[in-house]
Structures are given as structure tokens and as C-alpha cells.
Image (cartoon, helix red, strand yellow):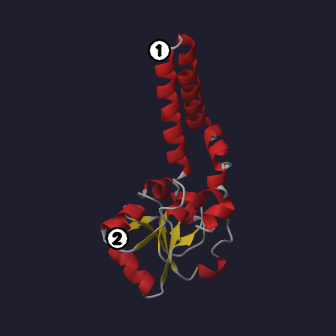
Amino acid sequence: MAETLNPISATEARRLMESGVAILIDIRETDEHAREHVLGARLAPLSAIDAHDFDRDHDKIAIFHCKSGMRTQANAATLLARGFSKAFFLEGGLEGWKQARYPVHANRKAPLEIMRQVQITAGSLVVLGVMLGMFVHPAFYGLSAFVGAGLAFAGASGWCGMATVLKAMPWNRPERLLNT
């Protein structure tokens, strides 16, 4: 079993994939993958990765990737526990792959990633609270404080209520993501 998750360039990763000795594993979430992904990459979201996801592939070299490489490196221990004899992380993640000018499948009709939706919504609510507090009534500053407290709680606990609500919106339903 691999003991370290070393970096691998997009060029070397592509060479190994094309020769059939490696598999590229996308650890991003379904919504991120639906919007843009490397053709041929296998989706195994980090939030739902299972010990048996790769039982048939342990003879291959695993190359894990996320958007930038940061999430992959931060979760190296979890990924190394998947049982591959050799495992790497794609340098620069999806962005590194694109920087090497390798093809990706992009679906601009797919909704924005949930965390981007959270950032847009939270930022908009904070600005709205400040504007309403300045021009309507100071009590509206409470809206900005509420959103800020929610973001602090999400960061501390790992659970984001706004993301949960946004995931339930019609444009983010799983069946829609798979059909886009």
C-alpha cells in the first residue's frame, strides 16, 4: 500500500492514463464534477468515498485530483487508505490539467458549485443588511450579523445550513445534475 501521496504532473498523469496503468480519480463533489471535469476521470466524492470503491483497481496507479490540489493533499491519509500500491495527487488539480492545455468537459448549463452559491448568497445578504441598516433602520444590521455568525458556525462545525438549503433548490437537485 502507498505510504505517501506524491505530486505528479499533468503530462505524466496523462501518459500513465493513456497507457492504461493509472486511473484518474476526481474527489470533488458531484456538483463540481457536473460543471467541469477531466474526460475519463472517475468521480469518487471525498464526502462519500467508500473503502470498496476501488476494489477492482488496486493493481493500477491512483492519481487523485480536486480543483487545485489543496483538498487532495489535505486528505492524503484518507486517500492513501484506499489500498493502492502507488498513489499520486495531480499537481495543480483540475486547474493544472487545464493549464497544461489538456481537454476537459465543461457544462456551463450545470449550476454553480454549492460553495460558490453560498459565497454569492452570503455576500449579497451581508451587503443587503448593511444597506438596509444604513438607509431603512439600524435593526437590519442584524441580518449581516446573522449571516456572519452562520458562516463562523459553518467554519467551526463543518456543517453549513445555507449549503443545505441551496442543495434542496430545484436547480441543484441530484437528478438534474446527472442529466446536464
Residue 83: x and y in percent read 60, 71
Residue at point 55%, 64% (across, down): 34
Which of the marked residues, 2 or 1, is nearer the chain's N terminus? 2
At mark 2, the secondary structure is loop
Residue at point 53%, 38% (across, down): 121
Residue at point 53%, 35% (across, down): 122
Q: Residues within 10 Å of mark 1 (few under 14, many from 20)?
A: few
**Quarter location, residue 6:** bottom left
Q: Outermost residue toward the bottom?
A: 19
Q: Nearer the viewer, residue 151 or 65?
A: 151
**Quarter location, residue 11:** bottom left
Q: Quadrant of the C terminus?
A: bottom right
Q: Quadrant of the N terminus?
A: bottom right
Residue 1 in view: no
Q: Nearer the viewer, residue 16 or 100?
A: 100
* Residue 72 to residue 9: above or below: above
* Residue 41 to residue 45: above or below: below
At mark 1, the secondary structure is helix
Q: Nearer the viewer, residue 50 or 117?
A: 117
**Residue position marked by numbered label 2 in the rendering:** 9
**Residue position marked by numbered label 1 in the rendering:** 135
Residue at point 37%, 82% (across, down): 15
Q: Residues within 10 Å of mark 2 (few under 14, many from 20)?
A: some
How many numbered marks, from 0 up? 2
Residue 117: x and y in percent read 53, 45
Residue 26: x and y in percent read 52, 66
Q: Outermost residue toward the top?
A: 138
* Residue 108 to residue 61: above or below: above
Q: Amino acid at mark 1?
A: Phe
Q: Which mark is residue 29?
A: none
Residue 159 in view: yes
